[in-house]
Image (spheres, helix red, strand yellow):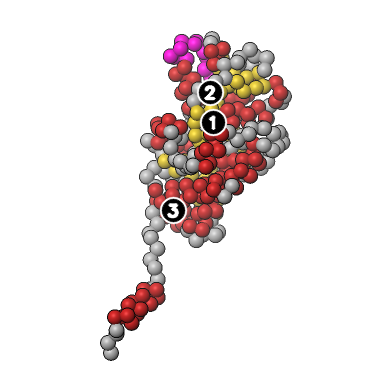
Amino acid sequence: MRFAPRALGVAIVAALLATPVVAEELTGTLKKIKDSGTIVLGHRDASIPFSYLGSDPRQPEGYSHDLQIKVVEALKKELNAPDLKVRYNLVTSQTRIPLVQNGTVDIECGSTTNNLERQKQVDFSVGIFEVGTRLLTKTSSGINDFPDLKGKNVVTTAGTTSERLLKQMNADQKMGMNIISAKDHGESFLMLESGRAVAFMMDDALLYGEMAKAKKPDDWHVVGKPQSYEIYACMVRKGDAPFKKVVDKAISDTFASGEVNKIYDKWFMQPIPPKNLNLNFPMSDELKKLIANPTDKSAEQM
């Protein structure tokens, strides 16, 4: 029996619909996560309020961590893996890039600046925050801006862009500063609080976080003209476009839905652990623009 042309077309379509569609083969990080049934999240222990250990010493929390969990939720749907397990891996300023590169962690969301130098080593998601590098100092210190640091002890955190900027400033302007590089932000603030340094240079949002956990927060203030504007983003392995696409979409969808405003308010405008202090750090116009128009470019490229 012969099929009429129209009948033949219908038969072909019906046959195609009855044939299972072969899903695009997973590669890279998506395959690693699917095969293992686990995603490994890199987190910080003292980057308040972005990623830190506060209420529960076994469980990170913070603004960046909440966005990281949005990525996990998106991966559960993307991989059809509702029971996807989460494993946490602590990283520091010095270890975060190598641990992403070597596959120990699948994604790191904390207070990591996207810059051109780091783009040679890892890929970055769309930006999740924008900061300026400034100074935390005692209100009675007499330090009001960077020129006041001449000949003084200044602390910053090792492996950060602030450390690089401070060393460059010291050399270029012959300021004679004694630069102390602490292992993390908590140790940097301890150096400051104990009087071993007169100022702590770091990203302004992180400085407000340290100030909020001080014994007497009113004794401290953030000063100085920003030496750089930087965009924080989540790090993923370089060249893994399918995984980065899922990460970018999860973050962009959180922005577009307006849910990011609730997350921001929770961590920057309300009392937070461990001392239930309020950072009172309103969302900047720069961050509002970043949320309205997500980009994976660094501040240098904007």
Amino acid carrying mark 3 in the image: Leu
Determine the CA span between mark 2 and mark 1. 9 Å
Q: Secondary structure at mark 1?
A: strand
Amino acid carrying mark 2 in the image: Pro
- Splitting the image into 4 quarters, where does residue 53 fall? top right
Q: Secondary structure at mark 3?
A: helix
- Quarter of the image where the C terminus is located: top left
- Residue at image mark 2: 226
Q: Position of residue 218 (x, y in %)?
A: 71, 23
Residue 284 in the magenta stretch? The answer is: no
Amino acid carrying mark 1 in the image: Val
Left or right of 11 on screen, residue 179: right
Q: Which mark is residue 30?
A: 3
The residue positioned 29% from the left and 80% from the top of the image is 5
| Circles 1 and 3: CB atoms closer than 8 Å | no
The residue positioned 40% from the left and 71% from the top of the image is 20
Q: Position of residue 225 (x, y in %)?
A: 54, 20
| Circles 2 and 3: CB atoms closer than 8 Å | no
- Span colored in magenta: 170-184
Does residue 104 appear in this view?
A: no
Q: Is residue 162 above or below residue 46?
A: above
Q: Which mark is residue 5?
A: none
The mark lying in front, picked from 1 and 3, is 1
Q: Position of residue 288 (x, y in %)?
A: 55, 38
Left or right of 4 on screen, residue 112: right
Q: Is residue 30 above or below residue 54?
A: below
The residue positioned 52% from the left and 42% from the top of the image is 292
The residue positioned 28% from the left and 90% from the top of the image is 1
- Residue at image mark 1: 131
At label 1, counting other C-alpha atoms closer than 10 Å, the crowd grade (few under 14, some 14-19, many 20 or more) is many
